Amino acid sequence: MLTLTCTVHDVNGGLLWLIEKQASNLLSLFDSVVVVATKGTASSVSMALRERGISVVVRPNNTVGLTFYESLKQGWATGADRIFYADFDRILHWTEFRSAELKKLVTALRRADKTDYLVLERSPRAYRTHHEALIKTEAIANSVISGVLDGYAMHDYLGGAFVLSRRAAEWALHEGKTKDLGFYSLWPLLTALHKGKITYRRCEGLEWETPDRYRDEIKKAGGIAKWRESLNS
């Protein structure tokens, strides 16, 4: 069984147009889909998801690490053999713009595999679609995590998507609760400490998804290039 579990923080309902288009496709790809919404997420988003058959859990606060932890907990509770985590805006973007790649990945995940933690990395092209401020700061975090886990090999641990075996999820749930973004390094580290298998897969669909929520702002700014530049402070 393959469960998709996600987190969402969408105050203004910018993802509604993608939910309307892609919710049914997500339900057809995965055996179960669960979305953990922050307290600040627009009620219209949660309502739209529930109306389309997606399970929604609303957290009482917006503590980022606990929101991700709850997402993993909810995915594990479905009884899945494999838990596919993705930021909800990312998986919607992936389904909308790179559906063939995502379907191929899901098919591969359903085959017998001994991987405990699959890091879904942004391809070089997908990484370049992000704004410069994010690229430069995330490079530091990725460098630190890679240095601990992989020595000289450089990997992208902050792509917002990864897949855990059931036992890797249990390790994370028992030992990996954190209030901040430390889970990005802690969960794969726990897998390594427990002698689990970590593998990597580059994906084109992990492009910069944030613009999908701000189409009106992008139009007012004069296009995506100018809007991206406005974020590079």
Image (spheres, grey):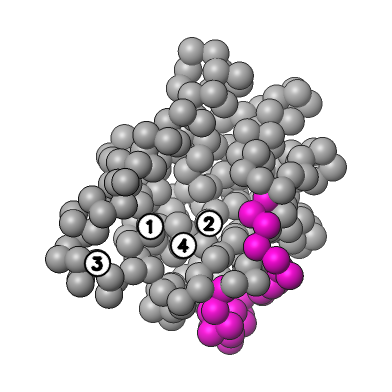
Task: Look at the picture and state if 225 lies above or below 124.
Answer: below
* Residue range corresponding to the magenta coloring: 41-65
Q: Pointers 1 and 3 in contact (CB under 8 A)?
A: no
* Residue that sits furthest to the right in the current view: 174
Give the mark nearer the N terminus: 1 vs 4: 4
- The answer to whether marks 1 and 4 mark residues whose Cβ atoms lie closer than 8 Å is yes
**Residue position marked by numbered label 3 in the rendering:** 218
Judge by depth and name the residue closer to the eye, 103 or 223: 223
In front of the other: 24 or 191? 191
Closer to the N terminus: mark 2 or mark 3? 2
Side of 126 where 115 appears, left or right: right
Kind of residue indicated by mark 4: Asp
Q: Is residue 138 left or right of residue 124?
A: right
Residues under numbered marks 2 and 4 in contact, where contact means CB atoms less than 8 Å apart: yes
Residue topped by disc 1: 209
The residue to which callout 4 is attached is 89
Density class for disc 4 (Cα within 10 Å; few <14, some 14-19, many ≥20) is many
Q: Name the kind of residue labelled 1 in the image.
A: Glu
SS of the residue under disc 1 = loop
Element under disc 3: helix
Distance between the alpha carbons at the discs numbered 1 and 3? 13 Å
Amino acid carrying label 3: it is Ile
Among the 4 quarters of the image, the one containing residue 93? bottom left
Label 3 crowding class (10 Å Cα cut-off): few <14, some 14-19, many 20+?
A: some
Q: CA distance from mark 2 to mark 4?
A: 6 Å
Q: Closer to the camera: disc 4 or disc 3?
A: 3
Q: Is residue 155 visible?
A: no
- Residue beneath label 2, please? 87
Residue 55 x %, y %: 66, 74
